[in-house]
Amino acid sequence: MTGPKALDTPYDSRTGILGAAYRAPTVGILLVVTLVAFEGMSVGVVMPEVSRQLQALDLYGVSFSAFLIASLFANVVSGLWSDRRGYTAPFLLGLVLFVTGMVLAGAADGKTMFLVARAVQGLGAGSTIVALYVMIARVYPAAMRPKVFAALSAAWVVPAMVGPAVAGFVAAQWGWRWVFYGIVPLVVPALVMLIPALRPRTAEEETAPPEGPRSRPLPMTIAATSAAGGAGVLLYGVNGLHVMPLPSAVAAVAGLALLVYGLSRLLPPGALRFGRGLPTTIMMRGMFSAPFFGVNAFIPLALQSVKKFDPTAAGIALTIGALGWSAGSFLQSRRTAEPHRRLRLGAACVTAGVLLALLAAVPGVTGWVAVPAWVIAGFGMGLGMTTVSVTALKQSPLNEQGANSAALSVTDMLGSALALGVGGALINVIGHSPAEIARGYIVICCLMGALALCTTLLASRVR
């Protein structure tokens, strides 16, 4: 059995994404996304315990950023590879690296090894996700893609419902290391189900080689190295400003310069100035990710350190938020409004959810307020992120789908990495006592709420 040929097969509206022609790739893709979702939900819940045991609370935000910055580099290489040679090889290599990183994280005996493990995981996840995007573009007709992306968001529901509770239980019974080890066996069924779709491109599916500056391997690899390295140097400088102001400021400026240089070549022309159409569509991915994930990672820390929640209880807010994400994605698939209107509504929901989540660290207010807050924020993310993905593919020529899928992931990962790095730096500056963590969390929420508000104002430029 082979996957369907979306490029030369007419779309039959009676055939769903789980119909006979598309069942194998759909199930395989959803299993892989479920695997990545388990990692994201589980690791976030146990990170406070990991930081304490490895004495790495000062690197709390950086441990997330290391994953994302490595993903940024892998996204670009995977996109180029997918456009020129097909998505099979980058997808398989990504899975191998992801599993290797999980094993290294479980075996880490210090914070340096743990950071390396997170970077390896990021390389694997970045390569895999971009290959999946190209797979969707090549396998499914345009009319089916909104439903596929809605299903991807829905694939987060089960891991979100059981992931935090399972991670908390496993950490309490056998230690946090087994949270990483336990994800590894999930690769086998996911890979087996996806094998039919991992076929070489046939002669009928071959297209003209990609052309243009964003398809040249060497310049793009240099640009990806510059962007990823610049982001790392920038965060290193920001994280050290309170300890060594002058050297850290120099590092931050140098990192910013490298980052801008790299992004100017990785993203479509006009993206950094939010040019109308595709440039802004690409940038909106990062504008959604930064405020949401910039707060999401610190909710378990605030609830466990300030409100004395156990890991399982702290993960419930993230669990319920994922249900809101799925609902927002489903609404997107119904196409009830123009893309820029859906993006504006989604960003407004993220703004409201982030500001409401601020109350979870306020004295005298129950930490459970994070639950409705993250339902609202999750709904906004489901509505906005899925709309961005569908709109970007619609605006992309066939031979630039890989490059633009990579650009989406670059802004996604970069937005999250910078937000998490800045949030971690704020926690370090303000302090690590419970009262200081509460203040730091409130400052983070205010900063990310302002960024989400800017996203609502920029949404109209997607047209």
Image (tube, rainbow, N blue to C red):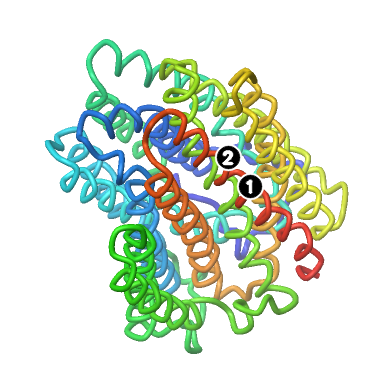
Secondary structure under badge 1? helix
Task: Find residue 336 and name its label.
Answer: none
What's the CA distance linking mark 1 and mark 2? 6 Å
Q: Position of residue 283 (x, y in %)?
A: 62, 67
Q: Residue at x 55, y 33 (%)?
A: 155
Q: Nearer the viewer, residue 453 or 220?
A: 453
Q: Nearer the viewer, residue 237 or 87?
A: 237
Marks 1,2: beta carbons within 8 A: yes
Dot 1 crowding, Cα within 10 Å, few <14, some 14–19, many 20+:
some
Q: Which residue is mark 2?
A: 442
* Left or right, 14 with reference to 166: right
Q: Residue at x 49, y 41 (%)?
A: 440
Q: Which residue is mark 1?
A: 446
Secondary structure under badge 2? helix
Quarter of the rendering occupied by the C terminus? bottom right
Quarter of the rendering occupied by the N terminus? top left
Q: Position of residue 332 (x, y in %)?
A: 76, 45
* Left or right, 5 with reference to 280: left
Q: Position of residue 130 (x, y in %)?
A: 46, 58
Dot 2 crowding, Cα within 10 Å, few <14, some 14–19, many 20+:
many
**Residue lying farthest to the right in this orientation:** 337
The amino acid on which the numbered mark 1 sits, given as a three-letter code, is: Cys
Q: Residue at x 44, y 58 (%)?
A: 131
The amino acid on which the numbered mark 2 sits, given as a three-letter code, is: Ile
Where 52 falls versus 98 (above or below)? above
Q: Residue at x 58, y 21 (%)?
A: 367
**Residue lying farthest to the bottom in this orientation:** 212
Where 355 falls versus 236 (above or below)? above
Q: Nearer the viewer, residue 198 or 145?
A: 145
**Residue lying farthest to the left in this orientation:** 109
